[in-house]
Image: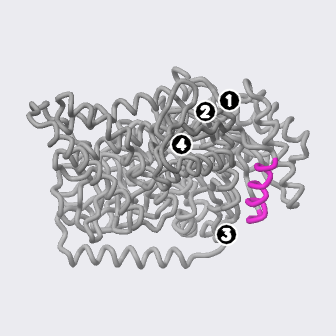
Amino acid sequence: MARRTVTVASASGLHARPAKLFVQEAVRLGVPVRVRAGERTVPANSMLGVLSLGAVQGTEVTLESDAPGADEALDALAALLSRDLDAEEALDA
Amino acid sequence: MPEDGHPNPRGSAPGPGAPGPGGLVGLGVSPGRSAGPLIRMAGPPALPSPRPVADPAAEVATIAKALETVVADLRRRARETADATAAEILDALAMMADDPMLREEAERHAHGGHDAPHALDAAFAHHRETLAALGGYLAERAADLDDLRHRAVAAALGLPMPGIPAPGHPYVLVAEDLSPADTAGLGGEVLALVTSLGGPTSHTAILARGRGLPAVVACPGILDVPDGTIVSVDGRTGEIALGLTPEAAAEVVGDDRRERARLAAGKGPGRTADGHPVKLLLNIGSAADLRPGAEGVGLFRTEFLFLDRRQAPAFEEQVAAYIEVFAGTGHVVVRTLDAGTDKPLPFLGLPPEPNPALGVRGLRVDRVLPDVLDTQLDAIAEAARATGATPWVMAPMVATAAEAAGFAGRARSRGITRVGVMVEVPAAALQARELLAEVDFLSIGTNDLSQYTFAADRQHPGLADLLDPRQPALLKLVAMCAEAGHAAGKPVGVCGEAAGDPLLAPILVGLGVTSLSMAAVCVPAVRDALARHTLDECRRLAAPEG
């Protein structure tokens, strides 16, 4: 079982645009990944699941997968979570 | 003064194309005329009684197909819209409808013996509860799930998709009321809006004015008019004529185009026919709303910059946003953060209230979170220094002279020289003279002032007549403020939706108002309306009859 623990960096937490980018990336990678925050574990490709974690900036989340390609997928998703995607949006605007 | 309590408070002399016996009248909320075939927006589907399920696999297939239909429809609309914000909203909705947890939940209910529509309904209800329980931003997403639920259930029942029709030709859109999710999908085919519910400050009205679409609300009879009937809509008088010929409809559209071209050709500052100046200003939410043609900004709604934030916007970020606006226009009235009933600011973390319209909102937030106003005033002062601008700064929801004095002291101690307060509650209007002893200007927010004067929720669909800005009690409060301003030699503006109404603008000027602040789209018609009346005529329009 591959596992990464990261702290959510986005100012708005894992909601709105950051959640959308995260789920889109999980869908694109196509590797089944689970996200755990506290007691709750949800599939990374589920927008409703990811939102329901209620993760805010600073929340520690764990990504897990035992599928082929897990390490690369977890690295990519962990990297996404540790960036402040809201700040990047502000730069875009 | 207009007659009181009449169901159509705008009942002026019928204009050209007035409805005959077959016509309808509602409340005109966005000026302009148009005509074309009417299409009713399908409402949320009703769930029929559950039917016994013989083959769960067939229900599972129906569920998959229904969700695919919803996703495909949303993705198509996202591709077709020219509005980047709308496309983003539609894409996010499509992702939710495409959610694997949602589909699995629905399939589980199907295997448990539910038919497809009931299984979908139960799955959406489950996720809705989860999000609603998390509160704040996520609770607002629960409303998105309701919209998706209606779409998916309709698809499973083989009913037309609820939401904005896309027939492939121009049409007049008819609905009970429009939600933000509906309006995100509003395309270029829509000629005009008519709703059976809604009032002058409803979402439909604000959206229509923002887009320059003629709109009539509070017109219950419209839902009985069959699809395809050619109707004309007058968004100024509220009149709707039924059963036009295609030729007559084309004539209405042509007349409207010529009238808009004539108004758009008007230039220069606001003036009555005899040259009395009235500043025409813009209501904006950010620098992106700035437009040429007005004389500055009369209402910079700073909370719109930070509506979706979970954390308080930092000093530096605020400075940057304010600099962008100050650099883009000469005269700006900044309103400090106005957290309220209809626009909670999640980053404030305020607890829910049993009666939020009467609770801790506007300047009252300062009672519990003084740092927020301090940071904002610091940021405004810094942006002013950086640009050399002299912003006017005002506080929302002020009720007493003591509150006004406290706010003015905080602002002036930072070097802000033009300090004002909004008049949104009757208490403030009644104390206009005392408020003006403390501050440099007043700005009347007619939307909230109506709500609080008439004890009528501004979103309430059944109270549109009470919320009409022509109500004599409201105009009396405006007059009190304007008189106090005149006595003190200080400006008194109006920045509610009333200021952008070309019929009402001369009345407000006649009452003594010195500036009118409105959506950019309203400026040409208001400029034209003022230019057609002398100041004396404005005063006569405003004078109580008899």
Sequence-wise, which precedes: disc 2 or disc 3? 3
Front tag of 4 and 3: 4
Q: Mark 3 lies on which chain?
A: B
Residue that carries the numbered disc 3 in the rendered image: B269
* Range drawn in magenta: B316-330
Dot 1, crowdedness within 10 Å: few (<14), some or many (≥20)?
Answer: many
Asked if labels 2 and 1 touch by Cβ distance under 8 angstroms, the answer is yes
Q: Distance between the residues labelled 2 and 3?
A: 30 Å
Of callouts 2 and 4, the N-terminal one: 2
Mark before the other along the chain sequence, 1 or 2: 1
At 40% across and 44% down in the image, what residue appears? B199
Q: Could you give the CA–CA distance between mark 4 and mark 3, rounded to whole angstroms?
A: 25 Å
Classified by dominant secondary structure, the portion drawn in magenta counts as helix
Q: How far apart are marks 1 and 3 (CA)?
A: 32 Å
Horizontal and vertical percent position of residue B233: 31, 62
Q: What residue type is labelled 3?
A: Pro
Kindly identify which residue carries mark 2: B425
The tag on residue B294 is none
Give B215 or B161, whichever is nearer the viewer: B161
Q: Are marks 4 and 1 on the same chain?
A: yes
Whether residue B207 appears in this view of the structure is yes
Mark before the other along the chain sequence, 1 or 3: 3
Tell whether B132 sits left or right of B224.
Answer: right
| Kind of residue sitting beneath label 1 | Ala
Residue B420 located within the stretch drawn in magenta: no
Q: Nearer the viewer, residue B118 or B509?
A: B118
Specify the amino acid type for callout 2. Answer: Val
What is the C-alpha distance between the residues marked 1 and 2?
Answer: 6 Å
Q: Which SS class for mark 4?
A: helix
Residue labelled with disc 4: B447
- Tell me the subunit letter for badge 1: B
